[in-house]
Image (cartoon, rainbow, N blue to C red):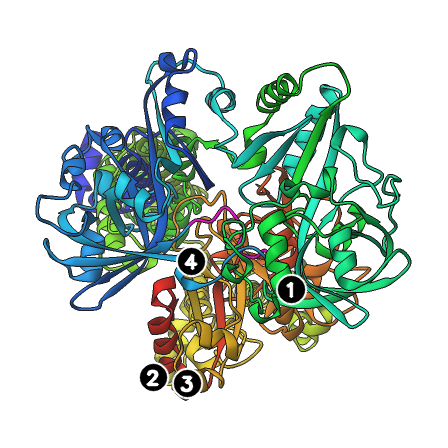
Amino acid sequence: MRRSLTYFWRINLAVVLAAAVATAVLTGALLVGDSVRGSLRDLTLDRLGEIDHALITQKYFRENLARGLAQTGDFKEHFDLVAPAVMSNGTAIHDKSGSRASNINLLGMDERFTRFYESSPGDSVQLNTLLQKPSGQIFPSIVINQSLKNELDAQVGDQILLSFAKPSDIARASLLGSKETEDVVETSRCVLSKIIPDEGIGRFGLRPHQTLPLNAYVSLPVLQNALERNGEVNAIVVSEKSDAELENTSAFLQDHLARVLKFEDLGLTLEQYQNTFSLATEASILSPQMVKHAKSVADTLNLQVLPIYTYLANTMEANGRLLPYSTVTAIETPVEPTFGNLTLINGQPAPELSVNEILLNEWAAEDLQVSAGDTITMSYFVVGPNDDLFTQRSTFRIKGVVKLTGLAADRNLTPDFPGIATADDMSGWDPPFPIDLSLIRPKDEAYWDKYRGTPKAFVSLETGKKLWSSRFGHTTSLRFGSSSELEVSAARDRFKKTFLENLDPEQVGFVFQPVKEQGLRASTGATDFSGLFVGFSLFLIVAAALLVGLIFRLGVEQRASEIGTLLSVGYPVSKVRKQFLAEGGLLAILGGLLGTGGAIFYAWVMMVGLRTWWQAAVGSPFLFLHVTPLSLILGYVISLAVIVVSIWLGFRKLSKIPPPALLAGVTSMFKQTRAGRTAKLIAMATLLLAVVMTGSTFFMKTMETASPTELFFGVGTLLLISGLTFFYIWLRTAHKSVLQKSGMAKSLRMAVRNTPRNPGRSMLSAALVGCACFVIVAVGANRREFGREVLKKDSGAGGYTLIAESDIPIHYDLNSEDARFELGFSDEDAQILEQSQIMAFRLLPGEDASCLNLYRVQKPRIIGVPQEQIRRGGFEFTKVAKSETNHDANPWSLLNQDLGPNIIPAFGDANSVQWILHSGLGQDIVIADESGEKVKLRFVGLIAKSIFQSEVLISEENFLKHWPSRTGYSYFLIETPRDRIQETAQILESTLSDYGFDAT
């Protein structure tokens, strides 16, 4: 064997090199996948440092909750570090240049947080010192990472203006919530003290994404003071010990969290009033989850419960008289004696009220000069679907007049309305909703001085829910009374203890997330880069394998006489075959070993390309080579098997030639045969099917069976198969003819006649060229230029010309003239905006579900689609679900379907749903809503090549049902004249810069 290998070294060297190429490409493709996964894993570990779990809530809670957690039970046995922090999003503006960066991560922290990055590179340990304000410096210090520095072009010593959301206990979309910019947006001026590299704490972020975050760091007390939340935070991070042996760490943390939660953390108060105690909230309205839990505890302790819902009426009118601004309490009557007396002026207890009946206290009845049996008309504000206020009116029949004693004189029935409760007189009211102070009379001031917010009227609880209920709830407080001899204070303490012991923190938004585990799980990637690059390189791999077989076959053909001699002297074919396969196998082994080294180089080159030339496609310059033994071995073994099979096939045909022919140097037995019926049937059937499918494209809108892309590849594949089959038939049936002509025609006929002499080689060559051409044409044909079709309503942009997002939700309708005035648009700018139509969407922050996020998406961003967009329609759909109940031709109406409890109809971009979310039409993805309950997002429509590649779309109604505290609008689609696009974007970004408004 050694002499044969060395004697035919030239041809053997070619076989080795071809084998090396095949191995390098296949193994290199596997290494690319390993490198992407390894790089994403490294990025995850780098950005999180020692952080293993994180608690982030929309509500601020006690900073000392972190300390209490660290001191509970056996917590220290399993965890090393605990740190509170304030995390927010916002906008940074360079004071001098005016350059702006939106969607920055603002982190308020102290030395407890920097300990999580002590082992990381950079200035993590000294960061807390750098945040301290030097003597003589007016404004607080700020540290930013290199990425934010590049956006702002800032230097140490420069001043930076920060804008970020100001938290509010009261929902801004409620009657009592303020929507004014000065109440929604907080600004703070800081001095840049340090720029840290984009690594370690400089890369900190809890959401998995390979792009660099824009991070700004300020001292925790400074940010708390700016937010007017001294001693409060909205996040806790935890580091788990390396030797911790917990089966369910998340459950352990949730259990210990439940032990240290207090009423203050939940924004609850529990006050005693005479023989009862009352559960109320800083949010003014108790959430349905809180009410349900409190009633359950009351049942356990055998306590009586009185739900109370107090609202503000703008006016009450009767007999031509008007009573302004009165609180009205919805309550169940008759009231149990435990809660105090609600007595009519005739001494009888207040009767049960129907939906259209009302009780007035004696002061209001006297003022309106009414009595039992009369009617009054009440006007009040109601929050509309777009969070705007409008006035409604209801008429009631007076059931009776109550004395201003007992429960009727209890001013604690009314919660502390902002801008009202602390006012010394009614003329000093400054509520977040409009009021007409000219309506207030001296007698109204006298009532306020004596009774404050004591209700002037009572309606049934059912009436209160019907008129004033919102998605935030319909209970302002719960009164509890004991039916036993137990002291009220003791009953209150038992209630408080039982309430906290039985509370599931997840139901109120307190959930520790295993962020490191989630990040490492997501680092496996949304796309299998190993399979992707194997697919990209498939033609090269196949071509290299065929080349190995062809070159080896050529080498064997050079030794045809040697084979013929061996067979003639009695050597069996099997022994000769083993000899040559042994030689080929050895060459394959050598080529594979050489190719393994080449695979590492190939993968390195690919990673360099991904982080430089093709960085726009992956969005990260931090992808580096990672070599794993498994991929090297797997790639080598697969390549070796493919090459050996190719060599075996190359020798197999030659071994069928008779020895006399081999001795004569014949290496090919050319024989024409008739093509089989099967080949003809395949050729005709695939051609006919392609024609039928092509004709069906004219009926796509009614068929709704496949997308144009699927039809393109389906028809193209069928035509390719048909063409290759016809070529195979020709190869088998070609006839010899005498070459009588001369010149070019004769040369061409000679080439044509030689083609069937080696049908196998000709067929393989044609197949490779045909497949390669098909792929190239397919890529070119499916390339989309959005600039040419963006104005079309059925395009991927739906006819919209601008997409915008705001870091801080906006609670105004940007199409409204009044709203534009409130937001500070000039008259000239407002006139320009009148030419545009702005569609506002609600947005639940989450992970980017587009192909620009290499991580596996677990919690995608969710958009709440308003009814205006559903009625407008637009965009191109690849597939929509069939509905037996919905017959609207507009696919968007499918979002309004009722699919059952906790099943939400959803839309998504077709490519993102298939390749990133790994789902499809009619399939579900499961996420947790605001209360911790699992809900299914079921795809009922897939949008083609759309601008919604990063999000999942659901109706606004379902959005508000499952995420009620997400108020305002943060995502906007803008339809504007083509010649006004840039001007409109500039006006919106400039005026709404405090909101972090960014339009593209």
In which quadrant is the C terminus drawn?
bottom left
Question: Mark 2: few, some, or many residues within 10 Å (few <14, many ≥20)?
Answer: few
Q: CA distance from mark 4 to mark 2?
A: 86 Å
The answer to whether residue 208 is visible is yes
Q: Which residue is mark 2?
A: 744
Q: Amino acid at mark 3?
A: Asp
Give how far across and how far down residue 853 sits, in percent.
39, 51
The magenta stretch spans residue 171: yes
Q: Amino acid at mark 4?
A: Asp
Which secondary structure, mark 2? helix
Question: Mark 3: few, some, or many residues within 10 Å (few <14, many ≥20)?
Answer: few
For marks 2 and 3, the one nearer the N-term is 2
Q: Which residue is mark 4?
A: 183
Q: Height in image: 70 above or below 544?
A: above
Q: Mark 1–mark 2 contact, CB under 8 Å? A: no
Q: Residue at x 37, y 41 (%)?
A: 206
